[in-house]
């Protein structure tokens, strides 16, 4: 199962992006701005976990396209 992180720094639109840490992503935040979300079957579980901390969370367009909504 893949491991996911969320960017602790929000984007201009207020979103906190969820990234797949197992496959990697060219848009991963600096390590200091990463919060581990643990291992999940899909990005949907990771985004749900991220929303427990950052209500405005979204999947990365590049590494979590199935969970990217804005």
Image (spheres, helix red, strand yellow):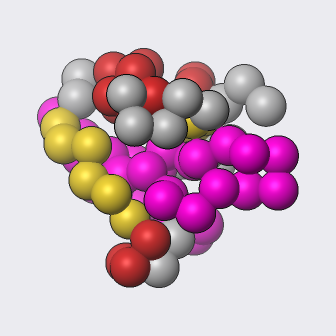
Q: Quadrant of residue 32?
A: bottom left
Q: How many marks?
A: 0
Q: Nearer the viewer, residue 62 or 48?
A: 48
- Does residue 64 appear anywhere in the picture? no
**Magenta part of the protein: which range?**
1-28
Q: Position of residue 17 (x, y in %)?
A: 57, 47
From the viewer's perspective, tell me whether residue 1 is left or right of residue 69: left
- Placement of the C terminus among the 4 image quadrants: top right
Q: Is residue 19 left or right of residue 21?
A: right
**Any magenta on residue 14?**
yes
| Quarter occupied by residue 2 | top left
- Residue 27: x and y, percent? 60, 66
Majority secondary structure of magenta residues:
loop
Residue 31 horizontal side relative to residue 29, left or right: left
Establish if 49 lies above or below 10.
Answer: above
Residue 58 at x, y percent in the picture: 60, 34
Dividing the picture into quadrants, the one containing residue 14 is top right
Which of the image's four quarters has the N terminus?
top left
Residue 66 picture location, percent across and down: 58, 24
Residue at point 17%, 37% (across, down) = 39
Q: Is residue 14 left or right of residue 53?
A: right
Determine whether 43 is above or below 38 in the image.
above
Seen at 45% across and 28% down, the residue is: 51
Residue 2 visible in the snapshot: yes
Residue depicted at 68% across the width and 43% down the height: 15
**Is 25 a magenta residue?**
yes
């Amino acid at each position: 199962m893949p491991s996911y992180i969320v960017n602790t720094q929000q984007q201009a639109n207020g979103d906190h992006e969820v990234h797949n840490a197992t496959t990697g992503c060219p848009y991963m935040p600096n390590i200091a701005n990463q919060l581990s979300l643990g291992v999940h079957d899909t990005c949907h579980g990771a985004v749900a976990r991220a929303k427990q901390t950052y209500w405005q969370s979204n999947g990365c367009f590049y590494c979590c396209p199935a969970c990217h909504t804005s």
